[in-house]
Amino acid sequence: MISTVKVHLQVIGEITELFWDSLKCMTTKPFYWGRLWEQILELGMGSLSITIVIGFITGLVMTLQFGYGLEKFGGTLYVPAIVSLSIIREMAPIFTSLLIAGRIGSGMSAEIGAMNVTQQVDAIRALGTSPVRVLVVPRVVATVISLPLLTTLSAFMGIIGGYIIAYAEFRMPGGFYFNKVLTTIKFADVFGSMAKCAFFGLMISLLACYRGFQTKEGTLGVGTAATWVVVRTSIVILISDFFLSKLLILMFD
Amino acid sequence: MEKILELKHVAKTFDHRVVHKDVSFHLHRGEILGLLGNSGTGKSVILRSIIGLEVIDSGEILYHGNRIDQLPEKKLFSVRKSISYAFQSGALFDSISVFENVAYPFFEHTKLKEPEIEKKVMEILRIVKMEEAWDKMPSEISGGMQKRVGLARSMALEPEILLYDEPTAGLDPVNVEMVLDVMRVAKARGSSGIFVTHDIPAASKICDRFIIIKDGRVAFEGTWQNMEDSTDPFIQSFLTGSEKV
Ligand SMILES: Nc1ncnc2c1ncn2[C@@H]1O[C@H](COP(=O)(O)OP(=O)(O)OP(=O)(O)O)[C@@H](O)[C@H]1O
Ligand SMILES: [Mg+2]
């Protein structure tokens, strides 16, 4: 029991150290713009279509459920407000982050893990360069930038999807729907959603890179790394979401 | 002769496995030192310790008389520009081409413009006879070729010391000769070297001096002649035993 606690604390310590190292590398030269751009393309563009689909479907389903749920109490008019608010504040950030966690868990950790096992990480060091600077910083920065943007796109698609159901099922006019959405959503909602996702992105990419560096010889190493990252990041996302939401409510509501 | 690199009483243990108990030797300027020993005696660990990829438990590693074994990672960067490690496996970056692998040190450590880098890279690729494969990815070339490109990458900045980790292992005789030629060129360009190998015939052709590691200590130190003349049964069995392999 005590030893497992010790191991967990050690992992947290090492991830924190990786975070500080990355910060140091971010604020000093050289910064690899090319590698950052590569990562943004791979991560952001690669996740674009799935993000759009997921966001859209979420909007459809939420409107359907809230629409028929609220209809019983004569509350159909509240559908645009409730749907858009819950999508922007919770659904889009959580779904997109979990999705990206899955992609990155098997992507980044496997990539760095394979490089570690084949001594490419050692080679980066042996050539007088820093693996944190070369491998971690571009990935972390790319994730922290991409995830909030993807989430915002996903939320936008969700609101569009919501309108389609609101019109098709409940005959709600577009003017009314979008007017309600725009008067409900405040800057703080969008900002809060993006801030949360920036934090989730940081956690996902840091954990994935960390686990990649831990990967040892053998194909088993790379496979278990992916599982490790997806499970840990999902837990971290869901738990920290509660506290971040509470914090944002204290700050803005 | 000037000692440019010296190990004094180096000890290293992994978890419970004692690899080095007390290893001391030195490298003179301009020579190639053969570092021999059976598999698992920690030859790679010695080379990795010299450039700080492993941290030694006790003892000292001196480069031009200055200790480099306690340096923080940041200070090691400059050491690694002067002491270069050619990995046993090549360790090429598999997401970039042969050309880009060799160009990496130039982009990182020099202010040269791209056309100049291009010229330098092609020149080094010619030395290792890989100029035709410059645009190939590492996965598209054979293991022997990967080793040569790895050599090219570690030679790029004309380091003062080159650490060769079994550069001829698993190669056919033609390729072995090619690698030895590359090592001669590197030497002519001013790089001293430590040549870790099981390949006694190859070592005998190129090394100025030899040491043999056994049970975590240096069991022999001397020239090829000294080694052949030795009556020590271990050294004799080592010479004859390895020659059969
Ligand atoms: N990172 C490590 N963790 C634990 N043990 C290690 C590590 N690196 C090396 N060892 C152990 O140290 C010993 C020496 O390894 P090393 O690779 O230096 O041998 P070697 O002399 O280069 O052998 P070979 O000729 O097969 O390459 C081995 O028994 C190996 O298991
Ligand atoms: Mg070895």
Image (tube, rainbow, N blue to C red):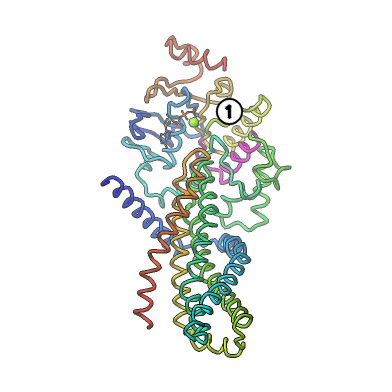
Looking at the picture, does residue B127 appear above or below residue B110?
above
**Image coords of residue A190 (percent x, y):** 48, 79
* Depth check, front residue: A113 or B102: A113
Expressed as whole percent of the image width and height from the top left, the position of residue A180 reads 53, 88
Q: Is residue B116 above or below residue B209?
A: below
Task: Say above or below: A163 vs A94.
Answer: below
User: Looking at the picture, how far across and down is residue A97, in whole percent?
Assistant: 50, 64
The residue drawn where x is 68% and y is 46% is B122
- Quarter of the picture containing the C terminus of chain B is top right
Point 51% across, 18% down: residue: B224
At horizontal 48% and vertical 67% (from top left) the residue drawn is: A94
Quadrant of the rendered image containing residue B217: top left
Magenta stretch: helix, strand or loop mostly: helix
Q: Position of residue B77 (x, y in %)?
A: 45, 50
The image quadrant where one finds the N terminus of chain B is top left
Q: Please report the bounds of the magenta region as a residue range.
A: B144-163
* A204 up-or-down from B71: above or below: below
* A80 and B172: which is toward the camera: A80
Residue B243 occupies quadrant: top right
Q: Is mark 1 within 8 Å of ligand 1?
A: no
| Label 1 sits on residue | B169
**Three-letter amino acid code at disc 1?**
Ala
Tell me: B90 left or right of A202: right
Residue B51 appears in the rendering = yes
Is residue B32 something that shows in the picture?
A: no
Q: Is residue B160 magenta?
A: yes
Of all residues, the one furthest to the left in this rendering is A2
Q: Residue at x 48, y 20 (%)?
A: B223
Q: Chain of mark 1?
A: B
Q: Secondary structure at mark 1?
A: loop
The quadrant of the rendered image in which ligand 1 is seen is top left
